Amino acid sequence: MKKEISTKWESKNSKDTKEKDTRGYKGASGSRVRGDKPGYVKPGTGTRPRVETKPRVEVKASVEVKPKVEERPIREDLIEGRNAVIEALKSDRTIEQILVAKGDTEGSINVVLGLAKEKGIVVKEVDRKKLDQMSDFGAHQGVLAIVTPYNYYEVNEILEYAKEKGEKPFIIVLDEIEDPHNFGAIIRTAEISGVHGIIITKRRNVGVTPTVYKTSAGAVEHMRIAKVTNINTTLDILKAAGIWVYGADSLGENYCFNEKLDGAIALVIGSEGRGISKLTKEKCDVLIKIPMVGQITSLNASVAAGIIMYEVLKQKIGSGIK
């Protein structure tokens, strides 16, 4: 049985081979070439037949072009939030008008309306969407005050203010603080720590914007802020007035609580990412640092400023010095 199957298989295979041998394909010369495949050309017999191909279709991907969003200029004539507006009403700040969301008559908004009525300030009820459009950061709490922009002080006025109070000058100098939330938080802590004034640079430093006002909880109204062209020249002026300049730096010589900080001092706080610039560091009399034992090697600018400001206040209270 096995032999018969094998014979049939060989016979069939032999037949197929013969059929293939007798079949051929025309080469380039027109002769039949045994065993060649279609399109095959023997060397020297001619050119290879041309194979027609479909034309390539280029598909261009559609790219969505987003419209360019124009940055809205920061306004310094707006005050947002109930507490901030209340503090502005309690101060001598010139308020042109107050905008209140329609139907908002609960809580501290009544304090705003009462103080505005006492001072004869115009109050307009507007749609809340209008306030959303005007708001700098969307936390207006249903009330906006349109005011005259902040009137910056001169450095001499800060020194005179300390003299009038019979206190040794305590001044904060900010070296290129660009974050309005940091600036607002520093103003708030400075006001309750007994700081007489804050000095900022005209370039690369955020001014008194609505965000700064809101973050400071209205402390801007009680703080003298001076804008100067050259911070290093200003530090020379402060030194000439008998003020010691301390710089907050992680590579400082001593910890802040080991330094005597109950005299006339100016505290320099550097920017969020770069710290105090090299030239300004050289102008400082002493560089002081804050103890840190964790894995993170830096503090937020407003937090670092707050820690040292309270150290100054603690030492002044302990020494009985104003």
Image (cartoon, rainbow, N blue to C red):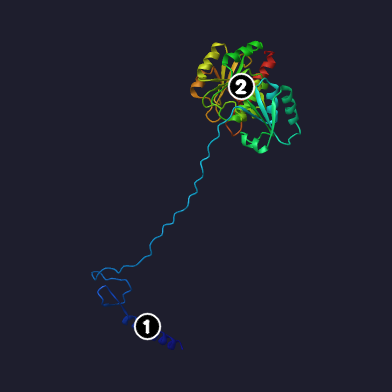
| Residue picked out by circle 1 | 16
Please give the label number shown on residue 256: 2
Q: Amino acid at mark 2?
A: Cys
Question: x, y (%) of residue 308?
Answer: 62, 23
Please determine whether, in this image, residue 167 is positioned above or below residue 120.
above
Residue 110 at x, y percent in the picture: 75, 30
Q: Looking at the image, which is closer to me, 202 or 291? A: 202
Quarter of image, res 38: bottom left
**Outermost residue toward the left in this view:** 44
Query: Which residue is at 35% across, 83% downward?
Result: 19
Residue mark closest to the camera, 2 vs 1: 1
Task: Decide which of tag 2 and tag 1 comes sooner along the chain.
Answer: 1
Element under disc 2: helix
Can see residue 292?
no
Percent of width and height locating residue 241: 56, 11
User: In this orientation, which residue lies closer to the viewer: 87 or 180?
Assistant: 87
Between residues 120 and 206, which one lies in front from this camera angle?
Answer: 120
Number of residues whose C-alpha sits closer than 10 Å to that of mark 2, classed few (under 14), some (14–19) or many (20 or more): many
Count of labels in the image? 2
